Amino acid sequence: MGIERARGWAVCLAVVAGFCTGLFVWQSGAGPGLRGGFEGERDWSLLFVEGPLMVFGIPALALAAWALVGGALRAPDWVAAVVVVLLLAGAGWGSMEWLEARTEPFTKRYGW
C-alpha cells in the first residue's frame, strides 16, 4: 500500500509542478500585452485564451505524460518523473517563445 500512496503523491506533485510552470510562464510572458503598449493598447486574448491554455493545459500535459509513460508503457516511476520534468521544461520554453512572439508589438523597441 505504501508504494501506491507514493505514486499518487508523485502524480499530484507532477500536476502541481505543471500548474506552477504554466502560471509562471504566463505571468512573465503575457505581462507586456496586458499592461498596454503604445497608447495603452492591450491584447485581452492573452488573458482569455493563452492564460487558461497554459495554466490548465501544461498540468494536463504533465498528467498525460505520467499516465502514458508510467501506466501504458509500464516504465519505472523514476523514468516517468524524468519524462515529466523534461516535458515541463520543454512546454515552459515553448510557451515563453509563443508569448514573446505574441507580445512583440507591445515590447518592440525602436532604435535610431
Image (cartoon, grey):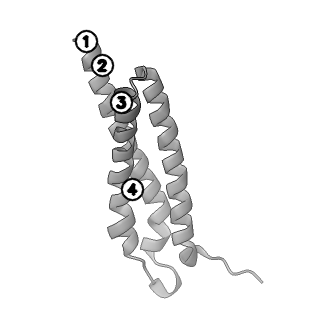
Q: Is residue 22 above or below residue 42?
A: above
Provide the secondary structure element on which disc 1 rests. helix
Q: Residue furthest right?
A: 112
Q: Choose between 7 and 70: the one closer to the eye.
A: 70
Q: Are marks 4 and 1 in contact (CB under 8 Å)?
A: no
C-alpha separation, residue under disc 2 versus residue under disc 1: 6 Å
Q: Secondary structure at mark 3?
A: helix
26 is higher (above) or lower (below) than 34: above
In this view of the protein, can residue 35 be seen by the observer?
yes
In which quarter of the view is residue 104 placed? bottom right
Q: Looking at the picture, which amino acid does disc 3 mark?
A: Ala
Q: Quadrant of residue 53?
A: bottom left
Mark sitting earlier along the chain (4/1)? 1
CB of mark 2 within 8 Å of CB of mark 1? yes
Residue lying at 32% horizontally and 31% vertically, measured from the top left: 11
Q: Which residue is mark 2?
A: 6
Q: Are marks 4 and 2 in contact (CB under 8 Å)?
A: no
Q: Amino acid at mark 1?
A: Gly
Left or right of 59? Residue 88 is right
Q: Residue furthest left?
A: 1
Of badges 1 and 3, the one in the foreground is 3
* Numbered badge on residue 54: 4
Q: CA distance from mark 2 to mark 3?
A: 19 Å
Label drawn at residue 2? 1
Count of number-bearing discs: 4
- Give whichever of 35, 68 is nearer the camera: 68
Instruction: State the residue at coordinates (46%, 78%).
Output: 36
Q: Which of disc 2 and disc 4 is earlier in sequence?
A: 2
Q: Is residue 19 visible?
A: no
- Mark 3 and 4 residues: CB-CB less than 8 Å, in contact? no
The residue carrying pointer 1 sits among few (fewer than 14), some (14 to 19) or many (20 or more) residues within 10 Å by Cα, namely few
Q: Mark 2 belongs to which amino acid?
A: Ala
